Image (spheres, helix red, strand yellow):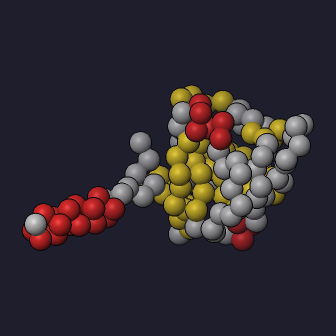
Amino acid sequence: MLLFVATLIFLVLLTGCAQITHQVCIRNNCFNVELAKTPQEQKIGLMNRTHLTSDKGMLFIFNKEYTYGFWMKDTLIPLDMLWINSNNTIVYIQKDAEPCIVDTCPSYIPDKSGLYVLEINSGLSDEYHISVGEKVEFVNIN
């Protein structure tokens, strides 16, 4: 019985350690990101979150490049949004997108097409001097 319990604990710990971390790195600034790949995941995004640590974010992954518009409906924390093209280059940054809890929220639409959109805490693109034209590295993003 003791061997069974020890094996079970080992498997639980092993499973927890095997979790894959998805990262988006811009120079030496890396963000551990949740992935939003499906339309349902993209619809929910970071809605109803009250906190996002400075090393975290959400990466929206689309099937083709386009000028995807975003809004902040039911998003409770201000965000910076970075549109990234298929060459892993930042093509547009929306800084300080404000939370919106009313029915009519402004849309943020880039002037360039992106394949990905990275959402991070508002102000971090300025703090880390992130700018349009910079390359992005994806780690464990499929």
Residue 37: % across, % down? 53, 37
Q: Is residue 137 left or right of residue 65?
A: left
Residue 3's x, y, as percent? Answer: 9, 68
Direction from residue 129 to residue 10 in the image, left or right: left
Quadrant showing the N terminus: bottom left
* 112 lies above or below 76: above
Q: Residue at x 56, y 42 (%)?
A: 36
Say if residue 80 shows up in the picture.
Answer: no
Q: Which x, y percent locates residue 38? A: 54, 33
The residue that appears at 59% across and 31% down in the rendered structure is 39
Quadrant of residue 66 within the rendered picture:
top right
Residue 101 placed where, x, y %? 85, 47
Residue 13, can we see it?
Answer: yes
Determine the residue positioned at 84% across, 54% down: 98
137 w.r.t. 5: above or below:
above
Which of these two is toward me, 16 or 23?
16
